[in-house]
Amino acid sequence: MPSSNPPRVPKYRLHKTTGLAKVRLSGRDVYLGEYGTPESRTKYRKVVAEWLASARQEPIGPRSPDKKTSLTINELVLAYLDFAKVYYVRAGVPTGEVQNLKYAVTPLVELYGATNVDQFGPVALKAVRQVMIDRDWCRSLVNGRINRIRRVFKWGVENELVPSSVLHGLQAVSGLKFGRCSVRETEPVKPVPDAIVAATCEVAPRVVASMIQLQRLSGMRPGEVVIMRTRDIDTSGRIWRYVPGHHKTEHHGRSRVVYLGPAAQRLLKPLLKSDLDAYIFTPADALAELALVKRSRRKTPVQPSQVLRQRRAKGRRLRSGYTTTTYARAISYACDRAFPHPELSRIRASRLNDDQLKELDAWQKAHRWSPNRLRHSAATQLRKEFGIEAARVVLGHSSAGVTEIYAEQDLARAAEIMGRVG
């Protein structure tokens, strides 16, 4: 969020060598004309007002009194990323959109970083897109990142850093269409079978297994599971109500309530904490559980060197809670244990040759699943048992069309109906 403190207004100064008035904005000197004249003071107030209105980004104006240069794409990208770090924030922490923007602009900067923004047009944007295609990015990813690049230029037009004609030209570049280009397509996200979920939970730490089971029951997003706190759960009724501290669509002004039934309550009761603000699921709890398991299996005395390592480990700062990334990684580790390669998983990685490492990597990727698929599993079951509208409400979607994406259609049911009537 932007700072609540009033910004410091840069001073009106004299450039002694030239006798011109100047003001330093974002590390750049903007020259205003002859020092002390009413015209220079009027221009000073104007450029400072525009600079403050644009969240104190790179000012418009020449770098020196005698040399006018257009903004380069490198400068535009840096200015926009500074803005994004302030704008794309949730609970005081930059969201994943900031990193997505960095990934999107990387090919742009590689090809055209030193190019002036007014020289960047549709053909150049298509050249950037072709680089993405050559890197074997899928169609939806390419379209998403090209849209983010357009967003950078749109922000530049809004802040008078980019001519509006440049954005108009970039908007003429159509997105890649399904079936009409040679770009790789991705497989649709499928629900993860319950048998695979159960096998993963058997070998996962209890904390991670509880998160998996709770998400499967409730259809929550991974980001809503990892931030659960006791304070956010109303346990006064027969059905508990969980209101996440923040959620994916809050910037649209939408509320989000997750209802937790008896099965979910049984999972959560032993995990609720006396510290109401503490996260319910933490890596520290998972590590403590792992240490207990190792200690119970130990058959030899603890060595002094290991005691020293344990003392040092206690001094490490662990995250207060899981992130969606660490949660997904924990599931991947559990999948590797639940579905080991018949031969290669028993061999240390350092002893595997390149071909074996590639085979092991392909095996692990094929047998891993992401927490987002649990939401698809819940959506499919809800739609099948209670209908699309019920699934929409439980999942917190604004329209049934979004729920259609998550819920795998019950084609067997359709075939059964047509077998009777058709």
Image (cartoon, rainbow, N blue to C red):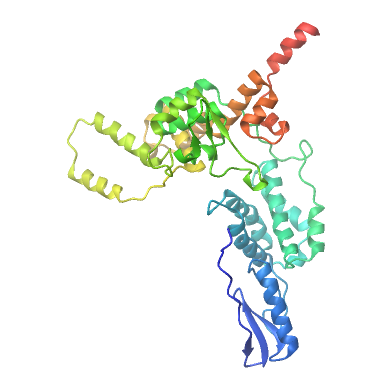
Where residue 419 appears, as percent x and y from the top left, is 76, 8
Name the residue: 77% across, 35% down.
179
Q: Is residue 203 placed above or below 322 in the rendered structure?
A: above
Where residue 220 appears, as percent x and y from the top left, is 56, 33
Displayed quadrant of residue 86: bottom right
Answer whether residue 299 is visible to the viewer in this image. Answer: yes
Displayed quadrant of residue 268: top left
Name the residue: 41% across, 29% down.
269
Which residue of the protein is positioned furthest toward the front in this rendering?
Answer: 236
Task: Name the quarter where the N terminus is drawn.
Answer: bottom right
Q: Is residue 181 placed above or below 165 in the rendered structure?
A: above
Displayed quadrant of residue 267: top left
Q: Is residue 249 placed above or below 109 in the rendered structure?
A: above
Name the residue: 65% across, 67% down.
75
Query: Horizontally, is 304 left or right of 180 in the view?
Result: left
Looking at this view, is 161 or 187 the one in front? 161
